[in-house]
Image (tube, helix red, strand yellow):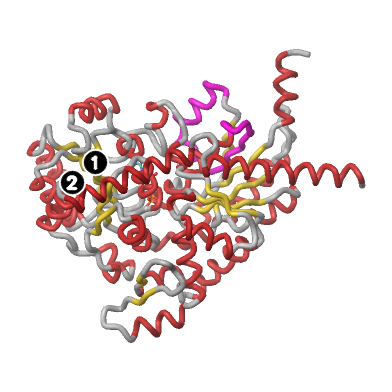
Amino acid sequence: MSSEDVECSSKTKRLHFLLIPMMEQGHMIPMVDLARLLVAHDALVTFATTPVNLNRIRPIIDQAAATSLPIRFVELRFPVVDIGLSEGCESIDLLPSVDLIFPFLNALSLLRDPLEAYLRIPDKAGWPKPACLISDNVHHWTVDVARSLNIPRLIFHGPSCFFLLCDLLVNRHRAELEAAMAATSDGFTRLQGLPHPIRVSKHDVITLSPSDPDKSKFMETIRVAEESADGVLVNSFMELEPWYFERYREEQSKPVWPVGPLSLYKEELDVKATRGKASSIDNKILFQWLDRQEVGSVVLVSFGSIIRNTMAQLYIELGHGLEASGRPFIWVVKKVVDKKVPRAEEWITKFEKRVEGRGMVIRGWAPQAVILGHVAVGGFVTHCGWNSILEAVATGVVMATWPHFYDQFLNERLVVEVLKSGVAVGIEPTDYLDVEKFNEAEVKVRREEVERVVDNLMGGGEAREERRKRARELGKQARAAMEEGGSSWKGLQDVINYVSEHQRKYQEANISC
Ligand code: UDP
């Protein structure tokens, strides 16, 4: 037997997972992490997405090829021009307007034909057919693909069980919540059935349970597809939200496996620094700068992949606040697109000069998870995207929460009120009730407030030390969950066992026929 034959026969025995991520950095990044973790658990992976998204993770693809990782990256053509978008708009963060998010989501099923066409091509490398499809929950159309392959379809959920449960309760009790909100002076009401006093606002209800018939129909399609899934993978860990995991499991009539924090998958630093996209800064300069800072002294400010600096004025306030705080910081600034502030770039350049040595501005993409893992970083001003929160939790960093939209307000409540590892900046959800307001939002947090929040986050005192201790403890638990034998490690192993068992039964049934 040649070495190629041996390799081929070993591959035929391994389980093959087909991964279909949602095209948005906050979904794509953890799915790439998941692909690598599955391979570390001895599986084969096909990762299918669109050309632009593949291009973004080119460094990861090249590294996978160079180290012979059994991950295939498959290109699916997404006909964005046919749905009225410009060429290349293949990810939520590339859409020119938030109004286009829904049409984009609605068009995702156009990926079905190219995927099925790919699956019909005979495999020349001796890989077995996929044994399982893991789909982002938004890709409802993958139900039929999995069915035609006779394989289980598992869904991957980006957010926490806390959020998933709140979402479920909001949708179930929408009318009561609205009535209760109308009767209160501040427009908030408590979500019943949870062990923590979690209050929801009109913003939560509108975004989680939209009244627009098209959006509501789309959400319903996703829910139906979710019901038919064989299991659910959640990028979270049991010790972080045990009650919510248990309760969410009770709600689902299928297995729910914790598999996170996925950002903790083991990888060389330079490879990890390309997570999501190649870094916009020379990582050597960045890490030399971080190495010079005192342990726990640096504040990282980053608002994720979608939020644009449309509110440039707000950013100017943020910049002044950071400057006045007197603390070392890294500030990740995405493109400024506010026409009312045409000289934002000039402002930032001057700002950089003023804070030289103490502050670093990263324009574009930062290796966020790696920065958070550096010992010099002690605090994180975050927009409360779930990945960002989990990355801070995983690295034991305290947070100042500055939510903007969708799940971010509920994520804030988890951090501040349940985990107690963060402090709220104080954004009112009502500020972002509609798109127009979101784009045109005026300054919500003045520079003095930014300075105060940074001080509250980074300063001394018993309460702050307690918060830091709590964050460190969560970080320890997160790392333990991902270590061999830990809760999330076992979660992924259970996924593999589940698929393996399904395959065995299917093969037995077919042999006996
Ligand atoms: N991210 C990054 N560099 C950036 C901006 C974001 O690495 O400059 C990563 C971040 O670490 C996280 C993801 O992009 O993994 C953003 O996901 P999240 O859920 O936090 O927010 P979203 O972008 O979906 O709003």
Indicate the position of residue 77 as horizontal and vertical percent values: 56, 45
Indicate the position of residue 506 as horizontal and vertical percent values: 80, 46
User: Does residue 502 appear left or right of residue 98 in this picture?
Assistant: right
Q: Secondary structure at mark 1?
A: strand
**Relative to 327, does residue 83 appear above or below in the rendering?**
below
User: Does residue 209 appear left or right of residue 42 in this picture?
Assistant: left
Foreground residue, 363 or 121? 363
Residue 36 in view: no
Pick the quarter of the image with the N terminus. Answer: top right
- For badge 2, the amino acid type reads Met
Residue visible at 50% across and 39% down in the picture: 32
State which quadrant residue 365 falls in. Answer: top left
Indicate the position of residue 257 as horizontal and vertical percent values: 57, 50
Residue visible at 60% across and 58% down in the picture: 140
Q: CA distance from mark 1 to mark 2?
A: 7 Å
**Neighbours of disc 2 within 10 Å: few (<14), some (14-19), many (20+):** many
Indicate the position of residue 102 as horizontal and vertical percent values: 46, 62
Residue 289 in view: yes
Question: Mark 1 touching mark 2, by CB under 8 A?
Answer: yes
Q: Residue under circle 1?
A: 378
- For badge 1, the amino acid type reads Gly
Residue visible at 46% across and 76% down in the picture: 211
Foreground residue, 436 or 144? 144
Circle count: 2
What segment carries the magenta color? 39-68
Q: Secondary structure at mark 2?
A: helix
Q: Which mark is residue 458?
A: 2
Residue visible at 45% across and 49% down in the picture: 239
